[in-house]
Image (tube, rainbow, N blue to C red):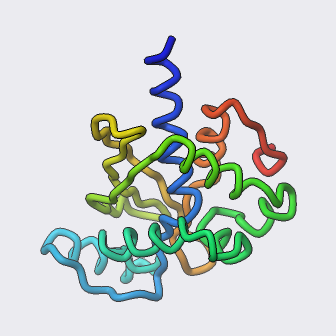
Amino acid sequence: MKLQRTGRVAVAALAVVAALGMSACGSGDKHSSSKAKTTTAAAATSSSYPAVPTVAQLNQELSQTLDPSVPSSQKVQYLEDGATALQKDPEMINKLITAYKQNNAKISVTSVSYLGGPTLTANANFSVNGGQNNVATVPFVAQDGKWKLQKQWACSGLQNLNQTSPACS
C-alpha cells in the first residue's frame, strides 16, 4: 500500500511542478545546447508554432514557478486554458504547490522533444522524499503563441493526490 501511495505521490509531484511552470514560452532564446534540439526548434518555428525551449529555459521557469513570491495569476500562463482554470478554481495552483512541498519533491528537466504540429514533450527526472529518480514525459500544447502544459495532464496529477478541482471538469 505504501508503494502505491508513493507512486501516486511521485506522479502528483511531477504534475505539481509541471502545472506550475514548465512552460515552453516561444519568446525566449531560440538557440539550443545540442544539434538535435536546434533542428527541432527550427522545425517548430518554420511551422508557425512557438520555438522549442531549451532545458535551461524550462528549469529556470520551474524555479520561478516554485517561488512562493510569484502570484498564481502569473503562473497560470503556463497551463493550457490557465486563466479559465484560475477562474474556476483560484486554489488549484496552491493545492499543487502544497503537495510538492509536503512530499519534498525534486525535479529537473532533462530533454525537450518537438513531436510535430501543436505538441511537444519534456522529459524530467523527479524524486519524492529523497527517493530514487524517476523519469516522466510531460506533454505540452501550443496555445496563444506559447507552449503550455496540457491541462488534462495537470488534472491527472491532482486526481493522483486524491484531490479534485472545478477547473478539471
Height in image: 14 above or below 73?
above
Total marks in image? 0
Viewer-closest of 37 and 133:
133
- The x, y position of residue 43, in whole percent, is 31, 75
Picture quarter containing residue 56?
A: bottom left
In this orientation, which residue lies closer to the viewer: 2 or 169?
2
- Location of the C terminus (image quadrant): top right
Query: On screen, 121 above or below 43?
Result: above
Q: Residue at x 32, y 86 (%)?
A: 30
Q: Position of residue 99 (x, y in %)?
A: 60, 45
Q: Residue furthest top?
A: 1
Q: Residue at horizontal 70%, vertical 56%?
A: 94
Q: Classify 160 as above or below 143.
A: above
Looking at the image, residue 147 lies above or below residue 126: below
Horizontal relation, residue 84 to residue 154: left or right: right
Q: Residue at x 23, y 79 (%)?
A: 32
Picture quadrant of residue 42: bottom left
Left or right, 147 with respect to 166, comes to left
Residue 66, horizontal then vertical, whole percent? 53, 65
Q: Is residue 43 left or right of residue 75?
A: left
> Please, which residue is most extreme toward the left here?
35
